[in-house]
Image (spheres, rainbow, N blue to C red):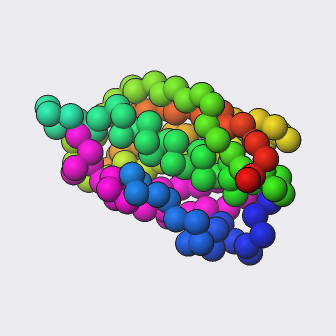
Amino acid sequence: MSKVNSGMEFIAARGLGKLAAKMEIEILEFTPDRAVARMPVSGNTQPIGLVHGGAYAVLGETLGSMHANFLAPTDKVAVGVDINATHTSSATEGYVIGVCTPIRTGKSLTVHEIVITRDSDGARCSTVRITNFYKPQR
């Protein structure tokens, strides 16, 4: 596990990256058990005003990859090897909330599920699953 004391310290030390910053992704909670973030609908939409499916994938990968790295064995780094997203609804205003939980954390692979909902009514908009591979850190 990370050498910092908490998940929020890990995020502060590592950062989320430039893409997450452009999409205004904000971490709300980050523990060994789960990670939670929000992303504004505004600025992350398709031309017809719905959250872009790729934006859901970016939110999911940001949470899943960061959480996998937080849980990474010493001297290993997590890199994404597979991601999929199923969109079941959408949002047109406010924020969407991503809740990331590990499905399996092993020595070489980890799998996380990220459930993304509308902040207004909790309706599920997308379910993202990401698999990360742990490789030696250079």
Residue 119 visible within the image:
no
Q: Where is 64 relative to 47, above or below?
A: below
Is 31 within the magenta? yes
30 vs 125, nearest the viewer: 30
15 vs 101, nearest the viewer: 15
Percent from the top left, x then y, of residue 73?
83, 52
Q: Where is 55 relative to 86, above or below?
A: below
Q: Quadrant of residue 126?
A: top left
Name the residue located 48 percent from the left edge and 27 percent from the top edge. 85
Q: Quadrant of the N terminus?
A: bottom right
| Outermost front residue | 138
| Outermost left residue | 48
Q: Is residue 67 left or right of residue 135?
A: left
Name the residue located 23 percent from the left edge and 40 percent from the top edge. 45
Q: Quadrant of residue 14?
A: bottom right
Percent from the top left, x then y, of residue 87?
40, 27
Q: Is residue 61 left or right of residue 2?
A: left
Is 26 within the magenta? yes
- Label count reads 0
Residue 83 visible within the image:
yes
Q: Is residue 31 left or right of residue 20?
A: right
Name the residue located 26 percent from the left edge and 53 percent from the top edge. 94
Percent from the top left, x then y, of residue 50?
23, 35
Q: Which residues are magenta?
A: 21-45
Name the residue located 69 percent from the left edge and 45 percent from the top edge. 78
Percent from the top left, x then y, of residue 137?
75, 52
